[in-house]
Image (spheres, helix red, strand yellow):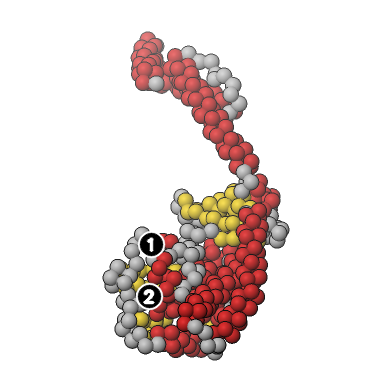
Amino acid sequence: MHVSRHAMLINLLLCALASLALGALFGYPMAGLAVGLLVRSIYHAQRFSQLSEWLQREDGSEPPEAKGAWGDLFDELARTQKRGRSREQYLRGIISRFQQSSAALTDAIVIVDNQNNLEWWNRSADRLLGLRAASDRGKPLMNLLRDPRFVRYYRKGHYQEPLELPSPVNGDIRLQYQISHFGEGDRLLVARDITRLVRLEQTRQDFVANASHELRTPLTVIRGYLETFLDQDLPRPLARGMNQMQQQARRMESLVTDLLLLSRLEASQHISDEHPIFVQSLIRQMHEDAQALSMDRGHSFVVEVDSNYDLLGQENELQSAFSNLVFNAVRYTPDNGTITLRWWADTEGGHFSVTDDGIGIEPMHIPRLTERFYRIDESRSSASGGTGLGLAIVKHVLVRHDGHLTIDSTPGEGSTFTCHFPPDMVVPVRDAD
């Protein structure tokens, strides 16, 4: 193109000189120059018109025939156009492969733009979510997936944990939603059919629940006979053995009770309905129970309650979760230690914490504390009478209330267990009343 540009300038200069010379031959040099330049301009206008028509056709036809600089220009543009078509064909192939591969996925994939409108989705989204390409493209996602639990999850913006809900198309299909941010405010939503996994989990839960339920009757009989025998005047070695049997029977009953509660909590990840919970009276009752459990161990209790806010939820579940934290603090805090119970609300939601000044927990244990039957010290836990299910129950209760548990602990200084609830679960006391 650089050579063609110089050639055009040289041709223009030669044309001007020839026109000037021809005009001078007839005694009108400037008129000859003007006529020559006019003829040259008409020629270039014709070539430009040919170029414009050829570019507008976009049918892959050969460029117009021309000589000199215009011919070089046409040939260079033809090569550029060919390279552009090859690149476009390559990109179309990539898009086609992506669409084919995404259509083959069994998971629903949906792209949502930064205005929360549907931009693109694959074929499985039609089947699992009921989206229709002809009518739903560009519509707000909230207009099509209206489950309040999904709306709350989507608007929260924190997608570390997936959400499980029934399919809006078929209630027998269980979906797991996972959302990721990408681009400038766009979101990628993946909905996975986990019906089979849910059924397997339900089978396991039913087995645990049924086995626990069946254990209650024989344990009740055993405890009844043990209490009867212990009321008698037994020899000391036999009485000691009977007392140990009674302690283990009580521990087994506590274990069965916790297993049944945990199975019931696992049956659903969300509470069925919400009721105002009067946090002040709930914490006051737990404080009294903790003092009774502490007995003569000399524990000091500090209670700090924000009396302006209450919670929405299931009272019996929250009482179970809070009491597990409080009773654990009583069991594992050394004599004469201090235990602090706090409830407060701020812009991030509601918070209930239990703080002790006990021996603390090593950092390597903290991520696993909410696992079932996980024990830091087997002998210490057994001596305290714990079942190993308390923190697992706390975790599941909080999940059902859209909350989460945080654990802060320093070995030798103590621990703080905090239950966090979202702002929409916190209500002013006036509203609760």
Q: Nearer the viewer, residue 136 or 187?
A: 187
- Relative to residue 307, is residue 220 drawn left or right? right
Q: CA distance from mark 1 to mark 2?
A: 15 Å
Instruction: Say which element carries label 2.
Output: helix
- Please state which amino acid type lies under the numbered disc 1: His
Residue 32 to residue 422: above or below = above
Q: Quadrant of residue 219?
A: bottom right
Residue 29 placement (x, y as % from top left):
36, 16
- Relative to residue 36, is residue 178 drawn left or right? right
Q: Residue sitting at 45 percent across and 52 percent down?
A: 184
1 or 2: tag closer to the N-terminus: 2
**Closer mark to the observer between disc 1 and disc 2:** 2
Residue 39 placement (x, y as % from top left):
47, 19
Instruction: Say which element carries label 1.
Output: loop
* Residue 139 - label: none
Q: Quadrant of residue 355?
A: bottom left
Q: Residue furthest front?
A: 235
* Quadrant, the C terminus: bottom right
- Mark 1, other Cα within 10 Å: few <14 / some 14–19 / many ≥20: few
Residue 329 placement (x, y as % from top left):
39, 77
Q: Nearer the viewer, residue 206 or 378?
A: 378
- Please state which amino acid type lies under the numbered disc 2: Tyr
Query: Which residue, given by chain and number where applicable, does mark 2 sit on?
Result: 332
* Residue 365 - label: 1
Q: Residue sitting at 58 percent across and 64 percent down?
A: 150
Residue 342 to residue 406: above or below = below
